[in-house]
Image (cartoon, rainbow, N blue to C red):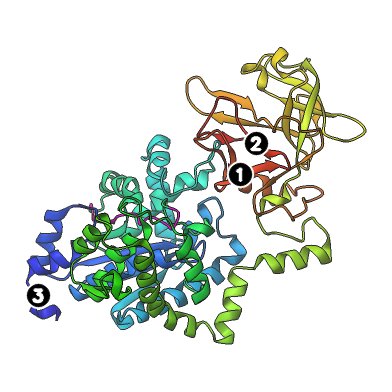
């Protein structure tokens, strides 16, 4: 088929359904002379989900257009992004990604022999690449590095150096994989523009960039591996698929942020060329669509009911997932899955055998001993103008000493007798010579000036009451958080205050038995 396509036809296949293309003229020029070389990279972090069919369908388009396609398993990037993949699991995650993505490609009829698969650490640890990392770090500003990774790398109040390195490494991959273009989601646009700006400063060519739209998840927001309710896992059972689709956001007539409808547009039509709605004859009977716009119009006009759309997508999706499920029924791949992604049950058993402490490495918020506290006295730190020395009742015989910097944001009078949130199982730390025995949790918004305020438990709460995250009520906190494991630091990056002033971890509310934890005046900030 490739030989029958003109350069213009190839360009159309390569760019259809993309949200943006940077370097169109460069692509057209290359296609006049030879086949295009491009790569798609994926950081080997959480389990791939059904939204991965979107880039897979584009890879099918690239191959139909005769492109030479490289798939990069970016294991080093997975570690640099706030250690989403622990170092000891990197190799297992890469093996899992390779098997699951090959199974996806096989399920949609993509010939694997035309693809090249590369692991990041196979070339990113070489002498030449390492020297280029140093060369790049000498010209990229901190501002540009942080800005480039803003939508891809996990954002924290005090970013790790690894997250600042991440965008530069992705830029260098283009040179070391010897490609003409990089393909990715539109959330990577700032990384792509960083590559275009800085690669020429090292004497390397500027590449073209192809960007997919971000497909909404089942809750209406971006589909994410870390948001269980927003995604359908590639190994979910048919029952789970039905259950998740049933709960998916799909309001009658609403075509905005509709993950079910988006799946039809970006996966089913490119792969199948049509989509069939199955419904009762009294509602018009079955109908086959050959254009997505017709489906969208009928849904907007409420000719197509959300229940019929979901049921039809369920049928089509299960046809894609069946061969993947079958492949992963083998003992070897089951073992690989369990090893690369240890289950919560395994972690719980491990914890039961070894106690709540260093034995359980699973990052769940129930490991944090967060309690309601009552401030019973407030004093200035004797050796620092910017620190308070507080005595806080956390339900123990003796109050705890807590040192914090709230003096710069909240008056002593406002803190006296106030109910607050206190993290009680951190290792005590000396702060200007005084031991701080816990941490006061506050809402914080960066800026000029910075805004900080304590979080508020529900009215009627008592000192010592446990604070938990919805869905994690049963877990027990560690006796002491091991500072070497950085449990608090890793969990803290997902602690936020919602637009409704509610304290949350990964969009799940922080609660006591009396209700939600709130911030009085700050919203959309971090919790630290």
Q: Seen in the image, is 431 located left or right of residue 215?
A: right
Taking the spot 37% from the left edge, 38% from the top edge, the residue there is 144
Give the Cα separation between the discs numbered 1 and 3: 54 Å
Taking the spot 32% from the left edge, 61% from the top edge, the residue there is 261
Taking the spot 76% from the left edge, 33% from the top edge, the residue there is 461
Q: Seen in the image, is 106 located left or right of residue 428?
A: left
Is label 1 or label 3 in front? 1
Give the Cα separation between the discs numbered 2 and 3: 60 Å
Question: Residue under circle 2?
Answer: 517
Taking the spot 57% from the left edge, 74% from the top edge, the residue there is 337
Looking at marks 2 and 3 on the same chain, the residue that comes earlier in the sequence is marked by: 3
**Residue 432 image offset from top left, x and y in percent:** 76, 24
| Mark 2 touches mark 1? (CB < 8 Å) | yes
**Residue 212 image offset from top left, x and y in percent:** 29, 57
Vertical comparison of 481 with 58: above or below: above
Q: Which residues are magenta?
A: 206-219
Based on the displayed image, in which of its 4 quarters is residue 143 positioned? Answer: top left
Query: In terms of secondary structure, where does tag 1 sit?
Result: strand
In this view of the protein, which residue sits in the foreground, 448 or 417? 417
Residue 5 circle label:
3
**Residue 299 image offset from top left, x and y in percent:** 27, 59
| Mark 1 touches mark 3? (CB < 8 Å) | no
């Amino acid at each position: 088929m490739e030989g029958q396509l003109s350069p213009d036809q190839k360009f159309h296949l390569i760019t259809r359904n993309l949200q943006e293309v940077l370097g169109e003229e460069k692509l057209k020029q290359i296609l006049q002379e030879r086949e295009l070389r491009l790569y798609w990279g994926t950081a080997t972090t959480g389990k791939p989900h059904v939204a991965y069919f979107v880039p897979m369908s584009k890879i099918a388009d690239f191959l139909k257009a005769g492109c030479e396609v490289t798939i990069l398993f970016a294991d080093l990037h997975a570690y640099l992004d706030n250690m989403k993949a622990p170092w000891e699991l990197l190799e297992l995650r890469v093996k899992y990604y390779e098997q699951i993505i090959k199974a996806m490609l096989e399920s949609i009829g993509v010939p694997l022999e035309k693809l090249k698969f590369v692991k990041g650490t196979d070339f990113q640890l070489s002498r030449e690449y390492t020297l280029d990392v140093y060369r790049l770090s000498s010209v990229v500003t901190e501002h540009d590095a942080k800005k480039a990774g803003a939508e891809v790398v996990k954002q924290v109040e005090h970013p790790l150096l690894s997250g600042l390195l991440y965008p530069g490494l992705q830029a260098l991959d283009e040179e070391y994989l010897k490609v003409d273009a990089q393909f990715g989601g539109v959330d990577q646009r700032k990384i792509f523009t960083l590559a275009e700006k800085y690669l020429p400063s090292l004497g390397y060519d500027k590449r073209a960039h192809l960007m997919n739209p971000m497909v909404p998840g089942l809750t209406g927001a971006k589909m994410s591996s870390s948001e269980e309710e927003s995604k359908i896992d590639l190994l979910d059972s048919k029952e789970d698929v039905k259950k998740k689709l049933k709960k998916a956001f799909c309001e009658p007539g609403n075509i905005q942020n509709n993950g079910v409808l988006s799946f039809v547009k970006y996966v089913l039509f490119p792969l199948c060329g049509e989509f069939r709605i199955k419904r009762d004859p009294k509602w018009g009977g079955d109908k086959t669509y050959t254009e997505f716009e017709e489906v969208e119009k009928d849904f907007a006009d409420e000719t197509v009911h959300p229940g019929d759309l979901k049921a039809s997508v369920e049928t089509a999706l299960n046809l894609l997932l069946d061969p993947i499920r079958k492949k992963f029924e083998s003992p070897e791949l089951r073992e690989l899955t369990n090893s690369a992604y240890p289950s919560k049950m395994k972690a719980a058993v491990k914890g039961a055998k070894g106690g709540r402490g260093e034995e359980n490495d699973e990052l769940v918020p129930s490991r944090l001993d967060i309690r309601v506290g009552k401030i019973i006295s407030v004093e200035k730190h004797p050796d620092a103008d910017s620190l308070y020395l507080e005595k806080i009742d956390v339900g123990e015989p003796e109050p705890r000493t807590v040192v914090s910097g709230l003096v710069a944001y909240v008056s002593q009078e406002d803190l006296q007798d106030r109910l607050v949130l206190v993290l009680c199982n951190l290792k005590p730390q000396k702060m200007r010579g005084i031991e701080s025995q816990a941490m006061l949790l506050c809402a914080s918004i960066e800026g000029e000036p910075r805004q900080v305020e304590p979080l508020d438990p529900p009215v009627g709460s008592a000192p010592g009451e446990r604070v938990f995250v919805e869905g994690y009520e049963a877990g027990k906190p560690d006796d002491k958080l091991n500072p070497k494991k950085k449990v608090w630091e890793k969990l803290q990056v997902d602690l936020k205050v919602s637009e409704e002033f509610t304290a949350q971890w990964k969009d799940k509310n922080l609660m006591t038995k009396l209700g939600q934890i709130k911030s009085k005046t700050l919203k959309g900030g971090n919790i630290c």
